[in-house]
Image (tube, rainbow, N blue to C red):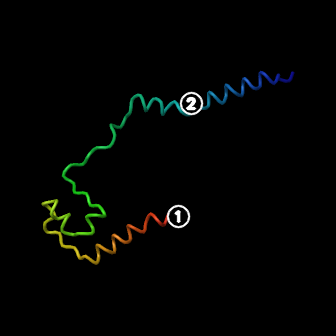
């Protein structure tokens, strides 16, 4: 009448194993045959870093299309200070 503990444990184990396989199967298939080719490098794009924000002429010097860039140093220093404070907000 009542199931034995052995059959209950086997059924529970097989049920959990089936659940895990069904949950992970899409990721295994995606790893074998990815649909997305991955990130692509965007060419002809100038990247600005915090180092570039310190000297407004360095970024314009490196990129010819930014030769007409006119930026006030005080604005750049404020932006750099805000960006520098962002990691400390997580703590």
| Left or right: 9 in relation to 32 | right
Helix or strand or loop: what does disc 2 sit on?
A: helix
**At which x and y percent is residue 52?**
25, 64
Dot 2 and dot 1 residues touching (CB under 8 Å): no
Q: Is mark 1 on a helix, strand or loop?
A: loop
Find residue 74 and report its horizontal and vertical position in percent. 28, 78
Residue to which mark 2 is pinned: 22
Quick check: 42 above or below 37?
A: below
Occupied quadrant, residue 81: bottom left
User: Which quadrant, please, contains the N terminus?
Assistant: top right
The answer for how far apart the CA atoms under marks 2 and 1 are is 38 Å
Q: Local crowd at mark 2 within 10 Å, few (<14), some, or many (≥20)?
A: few
Quadrant of the rendered image containing residue 66: bottom left
For residue 36, above or below residue 32: below
The residue at 62%/31% (across/down) is: 19
> Looking at the picture, how far across and down is residue 90, in whole percent?
50, 63
Q: Of 37 and 86, which appears nearest the observer?
A: 86
**Residue at x-position 77% and y-position 25%:** 8
Q: In this view, does 69 lie to the left or right of 78?
A: left
> Of the residues under marks 2 and 1, which one precedes in the sequence?
2
Q: In this view, does 4 lie above or below 59?
A: above
Q: Which mark, residue 12? A: none
State the residue at coordinates (27%, 67%).
53
Q: Position of residue 37 (x, y in %)?
A: 33, 37
Camera-side mark, 2 or 1: 1
Q: How crowded is the residue under tag 1: few (<14 C-alpha within 10 Å), some, or many (20+)?
A: few
Residue 48 quadrant: bottom left
Residue that badge 1 annotates? 91
């Amino acid at each position: 009448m009542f199931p034995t503990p052995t059959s209950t444990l086997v059924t529970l184990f097989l049920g959990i194993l089936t659940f895990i396989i069904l949950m992970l199967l899409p990721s295994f298939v995606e790893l074998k045959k990815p649909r997305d080719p991955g990130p692509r490098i965007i060419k002809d794009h100038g990247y600005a870093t915090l180092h570039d924000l310190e000297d407004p002429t360095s970024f314009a010097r490196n990129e010819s299309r930014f030769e007409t860039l006119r930026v006030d140093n005080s604005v750049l220093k404020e932006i750099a200070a805000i960006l520098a404070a962002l990691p400390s907000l997580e703590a």
